[in-house]
């Protein structure tokens, strides 16, 4: 686990990990801390985790700092604000019994506000192309390649991850998992996501979600560049695609609000698209 000032959520997150994953299967518990100024490190130690300092900066360096210390054939990565699903251990590791599978994860959805949670659940169903959704939405399955492929509740085969160079070395804190997903596929292996295993992403509310969407979009150019240079593959969505989704977001927001019976999605979805588009446009402006 990579941490930075995670004291607000860390105790409940580590407690849940202890409850879900039987201790007899745990070899090492490693926290890679990135200069936290709160009591993150002290909390981690009380739960029996070994705390080491990031050899670089950010998630990419932190993940590789941890990978150097892995001694087992399999390892798991978590995030400091992820409350693990109680059925995670009984369902996710078994996917690695398939020789072709290099990594396996469950899904995770925000705990608040309720509109964001329901929106995320609907989007997950949309990208999976479930039968009861509108046919024009089922055509977007290709855009869902990275859906659920995150670093917050994933088990890996150590040898395969090391064989592809470890975690991608990124200059930004976003997109490490997205680039890794492409590299896993390029190596001839699979990253399986079980959409029925649902963990909780501990969030502070809509404002935090909007800030996160804006921040992530500012990193897109670097993420897309790395996907292209690492795998020679196009990114899952284009700039024009992002602009189009923003333009139609009032209509799609209304559509999803009706489908989910959650009125707040009428304004939450356009707001998310606004902040995401704004982040991308401002990042492009800085580049020029």
Image (cartoon, rainbow, N blue to C red):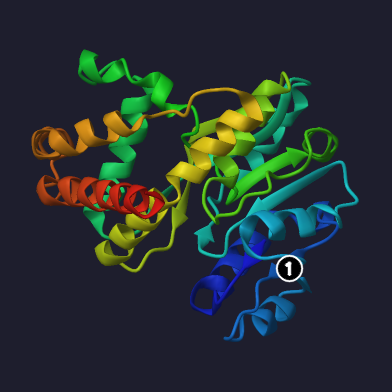
Residue at x 76%, y 53% (from the top left corner): 64
Judge from the rendering whether residue 41 lies leftward or rightward of residue 28; answer left or right: left
Residue at x 26%, y 66% (from the top left corner): 207
Can the viewer see residue 28? yes
Can the viewer see residue 20? no
Residue 95 found in image quarter: top right
Count every numbered label the image shows and give the total: 1
Residue 56 to residue 110: above or below: below
Residue 165 found in image quarter: top right
Residue 86 to residue 7: above or below: above
Q: Nearer the viewer, residue 78 or 13?
A: 78
Judge from the rendering whether residue 198 lies leftward or rightward of residue 66; answer left or right: left
Judge from the rendering whether residue 75 lies leftward or rightward of residue 237; answer left or right: right
Residue at x 48%, y 27% (from the top left corner): 145
Q: Nearer the viewer, residue 88 or 229?
A: 229
Q: Quadrant of the N terminus?
A: bottom right
Q: Residue under label 1, please give it.
A: 54
Q: Nearer the viewer, residue 80 or 54?
A: 54
Label 1: which secondary element: loop
Q: Position of residue 155 (x, y in %)?
A: 69, 42
Residue 121 to residue 233: above or below: below
């Amino acid at each position: 686990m990579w941490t930075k000032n995670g004291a607000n959520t860390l105790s409940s997150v580590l407690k849940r990990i202890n409850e879900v994953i039987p201790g007899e299967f745990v070899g090492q518990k490693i926290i890679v801390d990135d200069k936290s100024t709160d009591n993150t490190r002290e909390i981690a130690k009380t739960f029996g985790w070994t705390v080491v300092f990031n050899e670089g900066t950010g998630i990419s360096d932190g993940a590789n700092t941890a990978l150097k210390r892995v001694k087992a054939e399999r390892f798991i990565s978590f995030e400091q604000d992820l409350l693990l699903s109680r059925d995670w251990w009984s369902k996710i590791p078994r996917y690695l019994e398939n020789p072709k599978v290099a990594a396996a994860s469950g899904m995770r959805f925000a705990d608040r506000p309720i509109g964001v949670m329901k929106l995320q659940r609907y989007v997950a169903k949309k990208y999976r192309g479930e039968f009861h959704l509108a046919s024009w939405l089922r055509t977007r399955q290709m855009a869902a390649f990275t859906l659920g492929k995150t670093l917050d509740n994933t088990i890996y085969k150590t040898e395969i991850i090391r064989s592809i160079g470890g975690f991608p070395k990124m200059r930004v804190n976003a997109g490490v998992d997205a680039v890794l997903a492409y590299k896993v596929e390029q190596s001839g292996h699979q990253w399986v996501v079980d959409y029925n295993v649902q963990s909780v992403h501990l969030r502070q509310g809509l404002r935090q979600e909007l800030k996160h969407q804006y921040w992530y979009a500012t990193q897109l150019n670097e993420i897309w560049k790395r996907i292209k240079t690492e795998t020679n593959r196009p990114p899952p969505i284009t700039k024009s695609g992002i602009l189009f989704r923003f333009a139609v977001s009032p209509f799609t927001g209304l559509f999803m609000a009706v489908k989910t019976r959650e009125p707040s999605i009428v304004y939450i979805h356009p707001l998310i698209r606004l902040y995401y588009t704004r982040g991308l446009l401002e990042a492009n402006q800085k580049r020029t």
